[in-house]
Image (cartoon, rainbow, N blue to C red):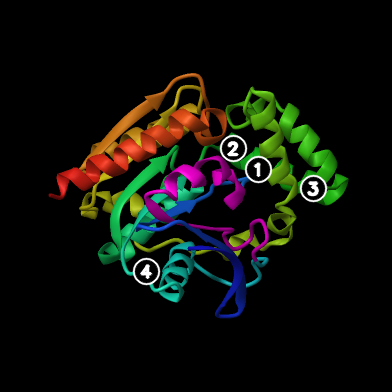
Amino acid sequence: MNRTAYYTIGKSKFYVSVQGTGSPLVLLHGAFCNLDVWDEHVELLARSFTVIRYDQRGSGRSDVINSTFSHHIDLKQILDTLDLPRVSIVGSCTGGAIALDFALAYPEYVEQLILVAPSLNGTPPPLRLIWERLLDHRRVQSEGIERAAARFMRSRYWRYIVPRERRARARLKEMYLANGVHYESRLSMQRPLMPLARRRLQQIQCPVFIVEGEWDLLFNRKVGRYIKEEILQSSLIRMEGCGHYPQLEQPLEFAGIVMSALKSSTSRRF
């Protein structure tokens, strides 16, 4: 099955891509990205899985955020629309937080989780990170997204996110520029799962595999290691020579790690 289309769920439109055949595998993008962050992995993964990607609300080609919502509920509604009752999930950055909330809210839907430099609801980010996000938003509003993108890519602070390799840098910049809807959105309208996930991780019973980048922000690495400590069926691998988005910086190695983790989890079930 290969289909990319807009789906209207409730009052919002979501841009969704479904490719391949086999067990369902959902790929959740993170901040400054959209579903295109997985472009270099889909061909390989779709040989063994039905791969579902979508631009989250307030990202890419999906609708702007203008009312209260929850990402984990959006994910459930998309899966129900596609008639997919049980899936594995790869969640990157904020997509990792969505995956964790989803696994806590709807454990019957989740086969396993692969979390890439995940965020975690209930773990406040550093004040510097909050400030830099606010500055980025203000630059887009005051200078336009083109100039803001150029400043983002040159920023010393964001170097843990921005790849060093030229082609990967260009791909991240393309996604940044395609995320104008994010800067038009009312981001405060997002509601995480309650009670917050940080204090509930021990409830997660499915296998969890965590990927850490060597050059990622220390705060992010600590979050990943905390998740590993709290979840019984979890393991962590460190990818050397990359930062917050190893799927952009080392796509072939990353795809191999994901395939290995998925196969390992499958073998443990039999």
**How far apart are the two marked residues, 4 and 2, measured between alpha carbons?**
36 Å
Quick one: label 1, few (<14), some, or many (20+) residues within 10 Å? few
Question: Can you give x and y, in whole percent of width and height, for residue 187 in the image?
Answer: 62, 59
One can see residue 93 in this view: no
**Does the CB distance between marks 1 and 4 fall below 8 Å?**
no
Quick one: label 4, few (<14), some, or many (20+) residues within 10 Å? some
**How far apart are the two marked residues, 3 and 4, measured between alpha carbons?**
37 Å
User: Which residue appears at 57% of the width and 45% of the height?
Assistant: 39
Label 1 sits on residue:
133
Residue that sits furthest to the right in the current view: 143
Q: Tag 1's secondary structure? A: helix
Q: Is residue 249 above or below residue 94?
A: above
Q: Nearer the viewer, residue 83 or 132?
A: 83
Q: Amino acid at mark 2?
A: Leu
Residue that sits furthest to the top in the current view: 241
**Does the CB distance between marks 2 and 1 fall below 8 Å?**
yes
Q: Nearer the viewer, residue 172 or 122?
A: 172
Question: Can you give x and y, in whole percent of width and height, for residue 197 in the image?
Answer: 35, 54
Q: Earlier in the sequence, mark 1 or mark 4?
A: 4
